[in-house]
Image (cartoon, rainbow, N blue to C red):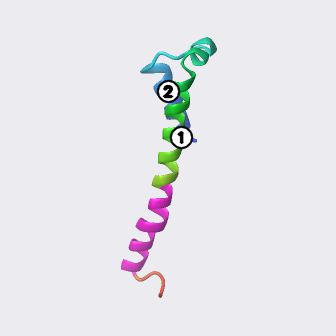
Amino acid sequence: MLLLVAAVFYLRRAKGICTIDQVKKRRNEVLNIVSIVLISGVVIYVFFLYVVVHVVGATLDLWKF
């Protein structure tokens, strides 16, 4: 959710897309930015969950293999 809020702030402040008409005119740009944000968020989440948490757990001997 925070990534989507950040994307909205970015589009409104940096790109100047504030109205529905501007969103309709620059639809491809908005969709590209939102999809990049969502895909990168999922990739970072999966990396953190399955790599970082696993390595830290194994290092601290929190679970046995």
Mark 1 Cα within 10 Å, few/some/many (few <14, many 20+)? few
The amino acid type, in three-letter code, at marker 2 is: Phe
Q: Which residue is mark 1?
A: 2
Q: Is residue 1 magenta?
A: no
- Residue 10: percent from left, percent from top: 46, 27
For image coordinates 50% across by 25% down, the residue present is 29
Toward the viewer: 48 or 27? 27
Toward the viewer: 28 or 36? 28
Is 2 left or right of 55, judged from the image as shown?
right
Mark 2 Cα within 10 Å, few/some/many (few <14, many 20+)? some
- Residue 56: percent from left, percent from top: 39, 72
The magenta stretch is: 45-60
The image quarter containing residue 31 is top right
Q: Is residue 56 magenta?
A: yes
The image quarter containing residue 20 is top right
Label of residue 9 in the image: 2
Element under label 2? helix
**Helix, strand or loop: magenta stretch:** helix
32 to 41, vertically: above or below: above
The image quarter containing residue 61 is bottom left
For image coordinates 45% across by 53% down, the residue present is 44
22 to 41, vertically: above or below: above
